[in-house]
């Protein structure tokens, strides 16, 4: 057997730690800081000393969180330790993972388990899940309880209980019967009988000889149980092969109708391996396809430009009458379908764009009684930014967001459908998975894309815990799709501005040269369309969006002029002459005659009818047109009646009356109380100031270097105070202090001891209760006592502090070797 690896952290038996606290106390400050960085939950609050840190590191919640973050081989190492003897020598652990001859699984080829074991063991030690030297490796008790097999929960290794565990509670007579059937001499007590049976099952030669006697069908039974689950059902009168195995203890009863394969037997059949397949090395993520980096960047830039257009179109479509907020929060299915139709995309992608705009703070609910979604004031600032900076704002909101649009349409724990912009969409693992997927792509050569299956396999190896790996796989798939449509990747490869985003650099300078310059002209065509040969300047695009409808998008956008769109422009306050001048100014082709006729025709009829509030009314100088409206059966629902030759009264509200007349083919205009035409502005609706949603963190935040340094100093100083040795009292009758407990002295003794320490310049050990009632032990070097306060250098906080004397529970002098 090879010598234990020095990388695994061997130590001699004489100075081996006897507990996790001792193992942590022996670490240097850098190693202790690394533990707190890897497991930030241990800092809430900062432990008072190393013993408290070790206790907290062994709690169930903290251990579960630490196990969740292990890679597959580190977890397999912990699982092997959970079924190994406690404590476990390094060679035994090595054989459980690599086999007696270095093999793994069905074949006998070395897959690197032996070479990677020191790394995995170092990871477990760094995480304080394993302690002890290489001769006595110990898994933290809570981790052993979580990973070891029980009657209701087999081990992840597929191994069952040991012979001793499986025979606990069995009658001594039955144990002796098994010993006799296995060919072993009878013993005087059940304990020695179980020991003898265990010795048989762990002796390869005797075990092989016993199995050679088994019927062929018995080997088939063992083959079905050997890799787990180790439990099987039996009838009251089992078949002869099962009876043969049960009589010799190769199968032991777990209940009246269940038998279990003992761990020692399974390990012999497995060749000593704890896992069917060990995976010591992470699956590689190789280049699947290669593209020219310039092509990747250009493709991603095109997607980025399309993303800006989509987000802007979405937000502007909610300017006038945004969709209502559901009572439970979020967007209704009908409104999501309507949004998808507006954006000419699928419903899942519409949910993504809505969530992206919401994460960037461009959309929010207005907070009114009839609550609706609407643009925020931040949208007006965003649209004025250069395109590259607008994209940077979207990408910077997407990368750390915990809201997950891919969950829209799923059901929560209560069977309710999750809606876009609604609650319950936060998944704290999303930012970490998103960043990890981009990091794996960034590790490839520039222009290289990866096979999605290889990416998923790598992520599953890095976080293999069942229950979280499935979600991480879905998050990774959504990340790949979202990164492509957002323009972080191009053709599956990470682009240059995507790398800058990942590296916390500003991607705008890299993206800006790739985006086309906005144009200030269109090409008008005789079929009542206009072609924009590129992105339009904002002023031109805003007017054209009102005057015409978007017919198709792409490298060039096609707009179509219709009577409705022209009327929309006239409703916004423009006149026919304004529209003619606008088109003549911005078209590099002559204004087609059909378009000029369309504008003039709609303008001639626009505002000929006037609608105002009486309950409402219609007035028109042409009484023949009013007669025509009254004679139309379709106007019956408006409740019209003639008040004067040029005035009709209506029961409908002004807005409904406007819509009804337009549905009849007329072009009415709204009228104010003074008789002026009411101009509809397109940019009137905004929410109050709203902040973007804050991502939901995954557990406690990772501490920075400053906090880690302060925490380590506090733990060391607290440990010094907790383990400090007090000087023996001069009076033999005085009670001796109990180690670890706060010292107790009277107020007079406390004052006298502290004053003496000021004169001699020595340090003392005090117990202190702060204003919140929290008790602590501290080692201080007093320098001044006055006004009921003592000021001195506090070794615990590594600074000078002042303490109220009445809050000091007691004081004791330190032994000379601790001064």
Image (cartoon, rainbow, N blue to C red):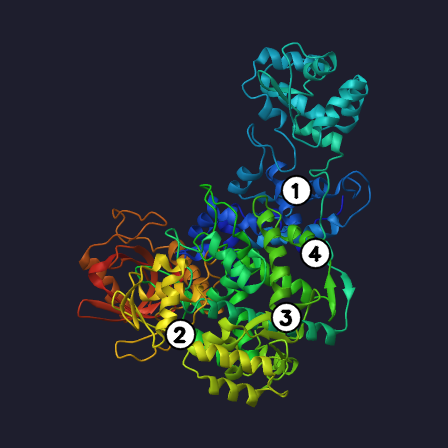
* First reached walking from the N terminus: tag 1 or tag 3: 1
Disc 3 residue crowd, few under 14, some 14–19, many 20+, Cα 10 Å:
many
Q: Nearer the viewer, residue 487 or 667?
A: 667
Q: Residue at x 67, y 31 (%)?
A: 228
Label 4 SS? helix
Q: Position of residue 637 (x, y in %)?
A: 35, 57
- Identify the residue position indicated by label 1 in the image: 89
> Would residue 686 be visible to someone looking at this image?
no
Quarter occupied by the N terminus: top right
Residue with the mark numbered 3 = 303
- Badge 3 or badge 4: first in the primary sequence: 3
Tell me what residue is drawn at x 47 percent, y 56 percent.
335
Cα–Cα span, label 3 and label 4: 20 Å
Question: Given this view, does label 1 or label 2 mark the residue nearer the observer?
Answer: 2
Q: Are marks 4 and 1 in contact (CB under 8 Å)?
A: no
Picture quadrant where residue 657 is located: bottom left
Element type at marker 1? loop
Q: Which residue is mark 2?
A: 377
Badge 4 local density, few (<14 within 10 Å), some, or many (20+)? some
SS class, disc 2: helix
Sooner in the amino-acid sequence: mark 4 or mark 1: 1
Quarter of the image containing the C terminus?
bottom left
């Amino acid at each position: 057997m090879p010598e234990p690896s020095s990388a695994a952290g061997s130590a001699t038996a004489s100075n081996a730690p006897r507990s996790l606290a001792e193992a942590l106390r022996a670490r240097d400050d850098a190693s202790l800081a690394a533990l707190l960085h890897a497991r930030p939950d241990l800092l809430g609050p900062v432990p008072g000393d190393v013993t408290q840190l070790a206790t907290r590191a062994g709690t169930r919640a903290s251990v579960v969180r630490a196990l969740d973050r292990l890679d597959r081989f580190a977890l397999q190492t912990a699982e092997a330790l959970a079924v190994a003897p406690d404590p476990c020598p390094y060679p035994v652990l090595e054989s459980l993972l690599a086999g007696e001859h270095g093999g793994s699984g069905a074949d006998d080829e070395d897959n690197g388990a032996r070479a990677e074991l020191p790394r995995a063991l170092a990871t477990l030690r760094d995480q304080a899940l394993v302690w002890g030297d290489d001769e006595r490796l110990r898994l933290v008790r809570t981790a052993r309880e979580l990973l070891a097999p029980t009657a209701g929960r087999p081990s992840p290794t597929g191994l069952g209980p040991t012979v001793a565990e499986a025979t606990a509670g069995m009658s001594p007579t039955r144990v002796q019967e098994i010993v006799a059937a296995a060919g072993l001499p009878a013993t005087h007590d059940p304990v020695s009988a179980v020991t003898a049976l265990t010795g048989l099952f762990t002796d390869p030669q005797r075990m092989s000889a016993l199995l050679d006697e088994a019927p062929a069908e018995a080997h088939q039974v063992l083959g079905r149980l050997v890799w787990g689950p180790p439990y099987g059902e039996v009838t009251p009168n089992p078949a002869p092969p099962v009876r043969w195995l049960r009589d010799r203890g190769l199968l032991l009863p777990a209940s009246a109708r269940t038998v279990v394969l003992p761990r020692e037997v399974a390990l012999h059949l497995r060749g000593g391996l704890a896992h069917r397949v060990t995976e010591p090395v992470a699956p590689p993520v190789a280049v699947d396809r290669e593209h020219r980096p310039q092509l990747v960047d250009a493709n991603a830039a095109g997607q980025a430009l399309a993303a800006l257009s989509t987000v802007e179109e979405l937000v502007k479509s909610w300017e006038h009458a945004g969709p209502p907020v559901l009572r439970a929060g979020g967007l209704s299915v009908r409104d999501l379908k309507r949004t998808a139709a507006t954006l000419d995309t699928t419903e899942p992608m519409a949910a993504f764009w809505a969530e992206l705009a919401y994460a960037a703070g461009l959309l929010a609910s207005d907070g009114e009684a009839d609550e609706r979604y609407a643009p925020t004031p931040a949208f007006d600032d965003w649209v004025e930014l250069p395109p590259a900076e607008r994209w940077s704002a979207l990408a910077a909101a997407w990368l750390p967001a915990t809201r997950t649009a891919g969950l829209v349409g799923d059901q929560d724990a209560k069977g309710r459908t999750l809606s876009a912009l609604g609650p319950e969409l936060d998944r704290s693992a999303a930012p970490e998975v998103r960043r990890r997927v981009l990091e794996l792509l960034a590790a490839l050569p520039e222009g290289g894309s990866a096979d999605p299956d290889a990416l998923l396999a790598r992520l599953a190896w890095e976080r293999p815990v069942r229950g979280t790996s499935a979600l991480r796989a879905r998050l990774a798939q959504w990340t790949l799709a979202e990164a492509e449509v957002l323009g972080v990747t191009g053709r599956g490869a990470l682009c240059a501005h995507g790398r800058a985003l990942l590296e916390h650099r500003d991607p705008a300078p890299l993206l800006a040269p790739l985006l086309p310059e906005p144009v200030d002209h269109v090409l008008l065509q005789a079929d009542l369309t206009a072609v924009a040969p590129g992105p339009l300047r904002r002023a031109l695009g805003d007017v054209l969006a009102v005057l015409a409808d978007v017919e198709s998008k792409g490298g060039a956008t096609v707009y179509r002029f219709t009577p409705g769109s022209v009327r929309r422009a006239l409703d916004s306050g423009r006149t026919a002459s304004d529209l003619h001048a606008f088109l003549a100014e911005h078209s590099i082709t002559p204004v087609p005659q059909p378009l000029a006729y369309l504008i003039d025709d709609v303008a001639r009829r626009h505002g000929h009818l006037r609608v105002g509030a009486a309950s409402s009314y219609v007035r028109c100088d042409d009484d023949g047109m009013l007669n025509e409206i009254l004679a139309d059966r379709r106007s019956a629902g408006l409740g019209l009646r003639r008040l004067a030759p040029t005035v009709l009264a209506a029961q409908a509200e002004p807005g409904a009356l406007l819509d009804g007349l337009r549905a009849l083919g007329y072009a009415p205009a709204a009228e104010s109380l003074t008789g002026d035409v009411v101009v509809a502005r397109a940019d009137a609706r905004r929410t109050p100031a709203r902040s973007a949603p804050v991502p939901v963190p995954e557990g406690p935040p990772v501490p920075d270097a400053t906090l880690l340094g302060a925490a380590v100093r506090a733990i060391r100083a607290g440990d010094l105070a907790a383990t400090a040795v007090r000087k023996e009292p001069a009076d033999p009758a005085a009670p001796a202090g109990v180690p670890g407990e706060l010292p107790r002295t009277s107020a007079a003794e406390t004052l006298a001891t502290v004053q003496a320490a000021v004169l001699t310049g020595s340090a003392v050990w005090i117990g202190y209760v702060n204003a919140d009632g929290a008790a602590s032990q501290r080692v201080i070097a007093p320098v001044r006592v006055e006004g009921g306060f003592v000021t001195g250098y506090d070794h615990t906080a590594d600074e000078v502090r002042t303490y109220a004397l009445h809050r000091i529970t007691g004081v004791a002098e330190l032994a000379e070797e601790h001064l």
